[in-house]
Amino acid sequence: MTPTTNQQGAKAPKNQPDIKLFDLVSTVLEDAKAEDTIVIDIRQKSSLADYMIVTSGRSNRHVGAIADQLQRAMREAGYGRPKTEGLPQCDWVLVDGGDIIVHIFRPEVREFYNIEKMWSADFPGETA
């Protein structure tokens, strides 16, 4: 993944997220009419990614369409082909963009798993 650069072209500090990817994901989710989108900063909680984004689609078809648009936009922007899970059923689709992991749920499935509550909780030894 390309590191973030400042206006002078210098690399951003390691703890700085890839703003271009974050903006791309945010724009795609907004354009695709994703609902109830929340962003969770997991930099201090996991080495999996910097951010986890949880959002909802109104139906299986809408969830699949959001995931498809997100994959296409990431590929076209030069981020490669993101790893994706859950596309056949489209109840819960995970799009792994490296620094950003996006979970796209149908509302009932999102309520059942409630992963945003788990990832928003403070972990032992974590300072608030």
Image: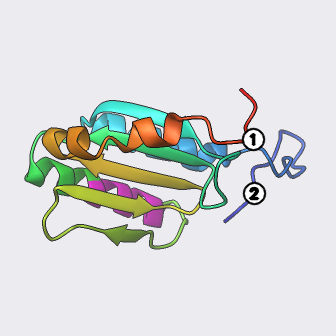
Q: Residue at left 86%, top 52%?
A: 11
In contact (CB < 8 Å): disc 2 and disc 1: no
SS assignment at label 1: loop
Magenta segment: does it hold 115? Answer: no
| In-front residue for pair 48/15 | 48
* Relative side of 43 to 110, left or right: right
Q: Would residue 32 be seen by someone viewing this image from the given angle?
A: no
Q: How many marks?
A: 2
Q: Residues within 10 Å of mark 2 (few under 14, many from 20)?
A: some
The answer to whether 82 is drawn above or below residue 29 in the figure is: below
**Which contiguous range is marked in magenta?**
67-76
SS assignment at label 2: loop
Q: Read off the residue under disc 1.
A: 125
Q: Residue at left 50%, top 46%?
A: 52
Image quadrant assignment for residue 126: top right
Q: Residue at left 71%, top 26%?
A: 128
* Relative side of 53 to 18, left or right: left
Spot occupied by residue 94 in the image (x, y as percentages of width and height): 35, 60
**Magenta span: helix, strand or loop, mainly?**
helix
Magenta segment: does it hold 74? Answer: yes
User: What colour scheme does the image use?
Assistant: rainbow
Q: Residue at left 31%, top 69%?
A: 85
The residue most toward the front is 124
Image quadrant assignment for residue 90: bottom left
Spot occupied by residue 51 in the image (x, y as percentages of width and height): 57, 46
Spot occupied by residue 26 in the image (x, y as percentages of width and height): 45, 38
For the residue marked with disc 1, what is the amino acid? Gly
Q: CA distance from mark 2 to mark 1?
A: 29 Å
| In-front residue for pair 44/13 | 44
Q: Read off the residue under disc 2.
A: 3
